[in-house]
Image: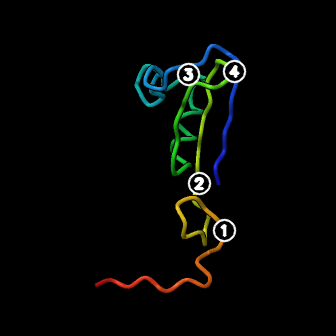
Amino acid sequence: MIIHVADEGAGFILKDVPDPLAEENLLSTSGRGIFLMRAFMDEFDVVKAQTGGAEIVMSKRLPGSDSPHGNGSGGHGSAPHTEA
């Protein structure tokens, strides 16, 4: 599953986002969204959106999906993988 989220704001640079686990940010009431998305998703990236803002691209491999792009086939009809 691939998810794209784009906004029309000013955008941001991922490396400039404060670390929510840094001591000075532990009691902050915001700033954990990107941390959680990175933790739960298999792939996470931020790119410049066509709207000028930021576009977040996330992917998650679903259970039963052998393909890195999650085609949903679950491997049915394919030969079993064997080690040489």
Amino acid carrying label 3: it is Ser
Q: Work out whether mark 1 precedes mark 2 in sequence or the reverse, and give the earlier one.
A: 2
Amino acid carrying label 1: it is Gly
- CA separation, marks 4 and 2? 25 Å
Image point 57% across, 41% down: which residue? 37
Q: Work out whether mark 3 precedes mark 2 in sequence or the reverse, and give the earlier one.
A: 3
Q: Secondary structure at mark 2?
A: loop
The answer to which quarter of the image holds residue 4 is: top right
Q: Residue furthest top?
A: 10
Q: Secondary structure at mark 3?
A: loop
Disc 4 versus disc 3: nearer the observer: 4
Question: Callout 2 environment at 10 Å: few (<14), some (14 to 19), or many (20+)?
Answer: some
Between 64 and 49, the residue placed more toward the observer is 49
Q: Work out whether mark 1 precedes mark 3 in sequence or the reverse, and give the earlier one.
A: 3
Q: Work out whether mark 4 precedes mark 3 in sequence or the reverse, and give the earlier one.
A: 3
Residue on which the image places disc 2: 60
Q: Work out whether mark 4 precedes mark 1 in sequence or the reverse, and give the earlier one.
A: 4
Residue 9 located left or right of residue 19: right
Which of the labelled discs sits on residue 72, or is there none?
1
Count of numbered tags = 4
Image point 38% across, 85% down: which residue? 82
